[in-house]
Image: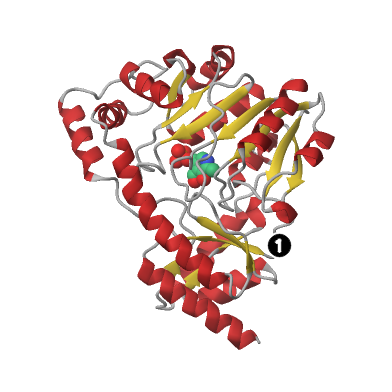
Amino acid sequence: MREANRLSQISTSMIRRMFEIVERAKKEGKEIISLTIGEPDFDTPPEVVERACRAMNAGFTHYTSNFGLEELREAIAERYGVDAGQVMVTAGGSEALINASLAFIEEGSKVIIPTPNFLSYFTYGKMCGGKIVQVKTHDNGFLPDVDKLNEVVDRDVSVIFLNYPNNPTGAVIREKELKAIVEIARDNGAVVVSDEIYDQIYYDVKPTSLAGEENVVCVNGFSKSLAMTGWRIGFTIADESLLDPMLKVHQVNGVCAPAFAQKAVADVFAESLFDSIVSRMVGEFRRRRDFLYAELSKIYDVVRPEGAFYMFVNVGEDCMKYAERLVEMGVAVTPGLPFGDYNETYVRISYANSMENLQKAVETIKDYESQKA
Ligand code: PLP
């Protein structure tokens, strides 16, 4: 049996290696505080669970339309100021990203990814036969310089991936820069895939949504905002002319998101519960961000995250070695390498963990640095 060629450039070795390091430490009886987590540490709120149970009992256990339950599409459309016809519910944000990639990345075309960025974009780009062009953002607060981006975008570009608030940096781009990038894409016939999955988790400035913009596919979902990672509900907002190619993939890929989960979220919106649930969680994330930023900026050069629940820290040494040594001391972080080029000395620290654990982790990091000195 031979793996298909399209997967030849895709590796799982990094994730495996980190997993093995953590597992080995656990086997040795060490207690590990994991700051590698890519999902809220909160359980799905009871308001959502109760509504899902109600929905299951009411028979929401079948397929829905490929586009999703009408009441959920309408609730999303109202929130983002678009038409319900522009909304397609998917099996998680990931499914929406794959649909967009298969629909718009032409083989041999260029795929622009500002780095550091969510590792899946690199995988999707390669899987679809695209040529990845990375735009470095480290010297600009992890935001792409619009002029630099303009220099690399031409008619060979099929897709530009954007993600604000960003995983792994927490950076949020301002509206002016965001719109300028959309303009550049439009002038060159490229599609912007704007992954807005963290749009509810912000601390300073409300992130701009590109929902409703021509040549933009917005990807979003409830994995992060309602702590529903295991439920698999995402959505895409795009012009109908862009939804159509994505439907060709979705109809044979995700098909539809789980019906009872769609109904539960629709009811959360109908009963005006969404914002209060989100603000409970964001309040806690803010406390942790403030603590972690205050502490880590005493030790490292850190950019203050404005959203999501990650901090991307330049630790000034090989990130794999740093991560391995820190695990030995009881704290797991994610090395920067999977997030693109130029990240050899960076690690991602997730603060989706309790304040108590974050305090312990900071002490460990301080010990580690003082041993080195
Ligand atoms: N986009 C980004 C930037 C993410 O960080 C994640 C998950 O970590 C996803 C998309 C995927 O989310 P979902 O669980 O909805 O597939």
Residue, x 72% and y 52% (percent of image)? 140
9 horizontally vs 212: left or right:
right
Q: Provide residue 56's location: percent of width, then percent of height.
A: 20, 29
Q: Quadrant of the C terminus?
A: bottom right
Q: Quadrant of the N terminus?
A: top right
Q: Provide residue 169's location: percent of width, then percent of height.
A: 59, 53
Q: Residue furthest right?
A: 151
Q: How is the image coloured?
A: secondary structure
Residue, x 69% and y 50% (percent of image)? 340
Residue, x 59% and y 86% (percent of image)? 370
Q: For mark 1, does the 10 Å Cα neighbourhood hold few (<14), some (14 to 19), or many (20 or more) residues?
A: some
Q: Residue 101 lies in what quarter of the image?
A: top right
Question: Which amino acid type corresponds to the residue marked 1 in the rendered image?
Answer: Glu
Q: Visible in this render: residue 251?
A: no
Residue, x 59% and y 49% (percent of image)? 171
Q: In terms of secondary structure, where does tag 1 sit?
A: loop
238 horizontally vs 181: left or right:
left
Q: Provide residue 65's location: percent of width, then percent of height.
A: 37, 15
Q: Which residue is mark 1?
A: 344
Q: Provide residue 53's location: percent of width, then percent of height.
A: 18, 34
Q: Cβ(mark 1) to ligand 1 < 8 Å? A: no
Towards the viewer: 44 or 65: 44
How many numbered callouts?
A: 1
278 horizontally vs 340: left or right:
left
